[in-house]
Amino acid sequence: MFVSTERTAASAVAILAPFLPFLLRTKKSRSQNLADVIAEHGGPAAWDKAQAVWQTFERNLQDDIEEVQGLALGLAARPTDEGRRATFAALLIPLLKEQPQLTREIFEQLNGPMPNQQSLADHGNFIDSVEKQKKASTKNKNKDKQR
């Protein structure tokens, strides 16, 4: 089965973003109620997925973890900022391409049973946007090579 690296990265960002303040234990997490965030963003299953995905990234991206955590902290400060989401996804894409097994593991974590798929569905436009940006970037690189 083909697993899209771009879609996997964008989906990971969509599930992680609302929970990053708690996963990273930022100051913002002390001003929010985790139970409210969980209820608003897909319920306990979404929280469990976010924890599993984050732990998988931490375990598998040791060489790049400082950069990943740095961008994650920026996203944790503003979890709904589409620019920060896109930047974080753009960082994850090449890291996932380097590790196809990691991509499959994250994909499987994201696509397991989840009672409330609405949280991920709400971010469908964001996921499509990341894929389009990646295609445009590749197209521009190919044009530059032809010159």
Image (cartoon, rainbow, N blue to C red):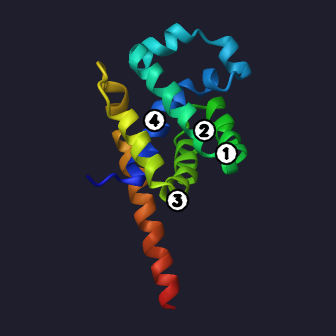
Report the mark closest to the observer, 4 or 1: 1
Q: Earlier in the sequence, mark 4 or mark 1?
A: 4
Q: Earlier in the sequence, mark 4 or mark 3?
A: 4
Q: Which residue is mark 1?
A: 62
Q: CA distance from mark 2 to mark 4?
A: 20 Å
Looking at the rendered structure, the kind of residue marked 4 is Ala
Looking at the rendered structure, the kind of residue marked 2 is Arg
Numbered tag placed on residue 98 in the rendering: 3
Q: Position of residue 75 (x, y in %)?
A: 62, 36
Looking at the rendered structure, the kind of residue marked 3 is Glu
**SS of the residue under disc 4:** helix
Q: Position of residue 145 (x, y in %)?
A: 51, 86
Above or below, 117 relative to 102: above
**Residue situated in front as seen by the camera: 112 or 69:** 112
Q: CA distance from mark 2 to mark 1?
A: 6 Å
**SS of the residue under disc 2:** helix
Above or below, 22 relative to 94: above
